[in-house]
Image: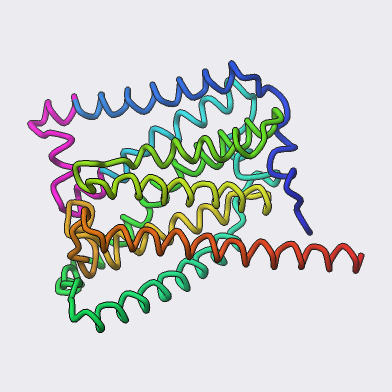
Amino acid sequence: MHESQGDFFQHANERNQVWRIFTGLFIITVTYFAVIFATTIVLAWKGLDLYQVTMSGSPGGLALMLLSFFPVWVGVAFVSRVLHKRRLQALYGPNYELSWVHFIKAGGVVVIMVLIIEAVTQLYLLSSGQEIYSRNMIDDLYRWCLWVLPLLGLLIIQIGAEEILFRGYLLQTISARGGNFFWAAALPSVFFGALHFDYVSFGNNAFAYVISTSIFGMILCAITLRLGNLGAAFGLHFFNNLFALFIYGFNDEMGSMALFHIDIDPKSPLMASGMILQSVLAIIVFYLWRTHHKRTNSDATLAN
C-alpha cells in the first residue's frame, strides 16, 4: 500500500495549537533536566560525579550517557498523552508502529555509504602515506562482545529520543497544523544541529559539524514525510551511530567501544573534508532515492 506525504500527520490533525507545541517543548525540557539533576544528586550521594562517569571513556560511562536520553521519551510520551490526547506510538506514523522494513533498508543504505567513504579514505591514505587507524577493542573482543548487545539496546533509546522529538513530535505537530517544510523540518533540524556544537573539541570545524548534522536532520525529515513513517529515520540514525560508536570511533570518551580508533585531530582540515564528503554523499543518495521513489509511485499510479 502506497503512503502519501500527508499520511504521516493526517491522523494527528487535532489539538496542535501553537501554545500546546511550545508548552510541550517546555515540559519535555523540564522533564529531561529534572531527571538529570535527580540522577546527579543520587550519584553524588554515592560519591560519584555524573559528568566524570559519562566522560570516563569506559563502556559503563558510554552506557550511562546513552541511558541519559531516556527522560526525553518520558517527556514526549507525557506531552503526547496529556496535551495532544494521543499515544506516543502516533508519532511513528498512521499505523502507530515503526516500519521495520524501512528500518532495515535504511541500514543497508548506511552500510553502502560507509563503504564508499571508507574506499575514498583508503585511496587518500595510500596516496598520502598517512595512517589514521589504530587498534582498540579489536584486541579485547571478549569484553566487546559482553558489552555490545546491552549498549545496542541503549543506542535505540538514544537515537529514538532524538527521532521522536525532532522527526516525530515537532515534524508531525507543526505539519499537522499547516506548517510548511521550513517551520516543520528545516528550523527544528537547524536547532538539532546546533545542539551538536562543540567548539572546544572541534574548533572551527564545529560549524561544519552543525551544518552537516542539520543537513542530516532535514534529510531524515524529508524521508519521513515521504514514507509516512519514522522507521527509515530510526534506521539511518541507528546504523550511523552504530558504526561511529562500535566500529570506527574517535579516540575520545565516546570511542571506548570502537573496534578501531580514528586518530584524526577534530580541528584539522582532514576532519572538515570528511564532514563535507559525508554531507555531499548524503545529499546525492537522497536525491537518487527521491527520484527513484517518485518514478516508482508514478508507475504504480498509472498501473492502477
Give the residue displayed 27% in from the left and 43% down from the top: 65
Q: Is 191 contained in the magenta span?
A: no
Q: Position of residue 302 (x, y in %)?
A: 90, 66
Q: Is residue 145 left or right of residue 78?
A: left
Residue 18, compared with residue 44, is above or below; it is: above
Nearest the camera: 44 or 136? 136
Give the residue displayed 50% in from the left and 31% down from the top: 76
Residue 190, compared with residue 273, is above or below; it is: above
Q: Position of residue 74 (x, y in %)?
A: 44, 31
Give the residue displayed 52% in from the left and 68% down from the top: 109
Quadrant assignment, res 11: top right
Nearest the camera: 5 or 231? 5
Q: Is residue 158 left or right of residue 43?
A: right
User: Principal SS element in the magenta part?
Assistant: helix
Q: Is 58 contained in the magenta span?
A: yes
Q: How many marks?
A: 0
Q: Position of residue 228 (x, y in %)?
A: 68, 49
Question: What segment is highlighted magenta in the picture?
Answer: 41-64
